[in-house]
Amino acid sequence: MAVVRHLRVLLALATALVGTAATAAALHEVGSRQGSWVGEAQVAIFAPRLHPDDNPLASMDGQAVRLAALVDRVVNNARVQPRVTSRSLTLADQGMRHDSVIALVNLGGQWADDFSRPFIRIEAVDSTRAATRARLRADIERVETTLDRLQDEAGVAASDRATAQLVPAAPRTWFEGTHPTRALLATGLLGAVLTWAASVRVWRRRPGDRAAAGGVAPARVAEPPVLPPVATAPGVLVARGNLRLSAPPAPARARALPAPLEAAGPSTTRTAVRTWLVDVVVALVGSVVRHRSRAGAPAPRGAS
């Protein structure tokens, strides 16, 4: 028994050490993530006022928006970007760390669309400013190349082409930090709780639990054989040869409950007792209230 207890202590200590090491590694990983660099750029599609025969892709004011939507669709391979609740949410706010998104500017909210301006919005996020700027430059080049290729395939003359221009002229990049204190506190608390629970589980585990978990049922103690019944005289419990054991006298029966309660069962008995106690309390409270009301009542006239 002492050996088993010693092994359980060692296993619990090993579990606590492993949990502590895992928690420390998680805290280091969370603490090293201080934030991300986010960048944004907008490409505007400008189309000259032309006759439909000159540039069928952008011959009217509204078709500049359609051309921008076509460029967005070709660049993203017809993949629809997820809708967000607010346009102020960045990619870092959405949980992205190394990614970029190209989408037609939607001035509507979460439930409605408003594509009324020929602007293509490019967003990027990465761990460094240089990496974020590189992502923005690559995506801007993709948009401009796609616009030129579409017009080349449509046979648009060089003087009638729609053009792409950055608005503003330079992409914006900024740093978005995280909340390391809260993240570290939550990670440490979670690691401590899991380590404590695992250690307690190992400490309280019995040998029979391990056998059951491995598919092996614990050994059962053999029961003694049941002897055949032997006819005995009244008042004799066992009679074998010259050995006779008399049955002990029946104990005096405790005071019986009233017939209704005894026949009703334990549940009904408890209900009746509770009802009686409530009645007694109500009666006592009523008696106290009446006594106080009599004591506080004004004396009758003529009383000295």
Image: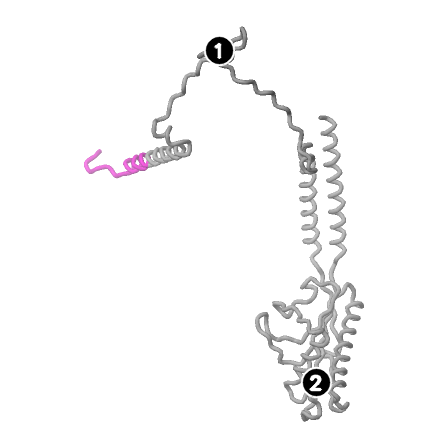
Q: Please identify the quadrant where the N terminus is shown.
A: top right
The amino acid on which the numbered mark 2 sits, given as a three-letter code, is Phe
Which label sits in the foreground, 2 or 1?
Answer: 1
Q: Residue at x 75, y 88 (%)?
A: 155
Q: Residue at x 37, y 32 (%)?
A: 264
> Quick check: 48 above or below 256?
below
Cα distance in 3D space between marks 2 and 1: 114 Å
- Choose top left, top right, bottom left or bottom right for residue 257: top left
Magenta span has 299? Answer: yes
- Choose top left, top right, bottom left or bottom right for residue 75: bottom right
The percent position of residue 176, horizontal first and vertical second, equals: 71, 64
| Residue for badge 2 | 46
Seen in the image, is 274 located left or right of residue 46? left
- Choose top left, top right, bottom left or bottom right for residue 38: bottom right
- Asked whether 187 or 233 is in front, the reply is 233
The range drawn in magenta is 286-304
